[in-house]
Image (cartoon, helix red, strand yellow):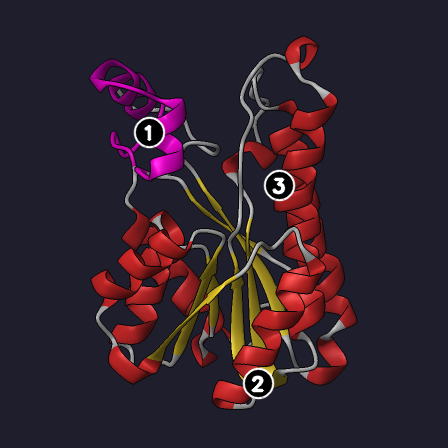
Amino acid sequence: MVVDPTSGMGLATARRLLDEGAYVVITGRDESRLARAAAALDAGPRLLTVRADVASLADLDVLMRRVETWRGGLDAVFANAGTGVFKPAAELTEADFDHSVDVNFKGVFFTVRKALPLLKEGGAIVLNASWTLYRGLPIASVYSATKAAVHNLARTLGSDLAPRGIRVNSVSPGYIDTEMYRGANTGPEADARNAAQVPLGTVGHAAEVAAAVAFLASDDASYITGQDLVIDGGLVGSFPNR
């Protein structure tokens, strides 16, 4: 299974899949981060690391050639690359827009597109979307739009790839404690404010997203495609009972 990138939900998903006996490929732009991830996972010959920028089609070609040489094909892909520029729309620049779209949408689409020749009949694709599909966040206009596009891919590719038996779904995490989350939400006050919006009363953990991805990638989800699984402690669907 190809998992991207090398920290947070991607790393947690790689760990979960390795624990379940899978062979896993992790990829990212930074060689040092890849090395740290590989050391943390400590999976020996069941783990391959490949440096690649998902916004570069040439890098994705290299990634898929390495995967084909290593294992011959793929059972599943978790397209998890993401970046965020969080500020009011009036302050967003063209560079902000281009970077977000290149990573969050173009990168995800072409990761899947380049992986298709290697994906086995009956395989699975999981795309990482976001809870911001469902609620307007004033500082996340472009980020939210790219994540809406990602979920739409799950629906359209789910139809497109159904004749090959390939299932395509997305996950939409809520507030999950990752490096990206901490970059936008600093300090205990931000954590408390966010947790107060969640009916379950807490910020989530990357391992909880990993469990959902592992389910959607498994045969246990054999009749699920084109769907979005929201992993948010009730954030978008309920008011807190307190």
Kindly identify the amino acid type of the residue bearing the numbered disc 1: Arg
Kindly identify the amino acid type of the residue bearing the numbered disc 3: Lys
Q: Residue at x 56, y 15 (%)?
A: 87
> How far apart are the two marked residues, 2 and 3, measured between alpha carbons?
29 Å
- The residue range painted magenta reads 177-203
SS at mark 2 in the image:
helix
Instruction: Give residue 189's quadrant in the image.
Output: top left
Q: Is residue 173 left or right of residue 141?
A: left
Per the rendering, the mark at residue 158 is none
Q: Residue at x 53, y 44 (%)?
A: 82
38 or 231: nearer the viewer: 38
Q: Are marks 2 and 1 in contact (CB under 8 Å)?
A: no
Q: Which residue is mark 2?
A: 68
Q: Which residue is mark 3?
A: 147
SS at mark 3 in the image:
helix
Q: Are marks 2 and 3 in contact (CB under 8 Å)?
A: no
Q: Is residue 77 left or right of residue 231?
A: right
Q: Which residue is mark 1?
A: 182
Q: Quadrant of the C terminus?
A: top left
Residue 167 counted in the magenta span: no
Task: Give the mark nearest the N terminus, 3 or 1.
Answer: 3
Q: Is residue 61 visible?
A: yes
- Extreme residue in the top direction: 90
59 or 76: nearer the viewer: 59
**Rendering coords of residue 185 (x, y %):** 35, 22
SS at mark 1 in the image:
helix
Q: Is residue 177 left or right of residue 5?
A: left
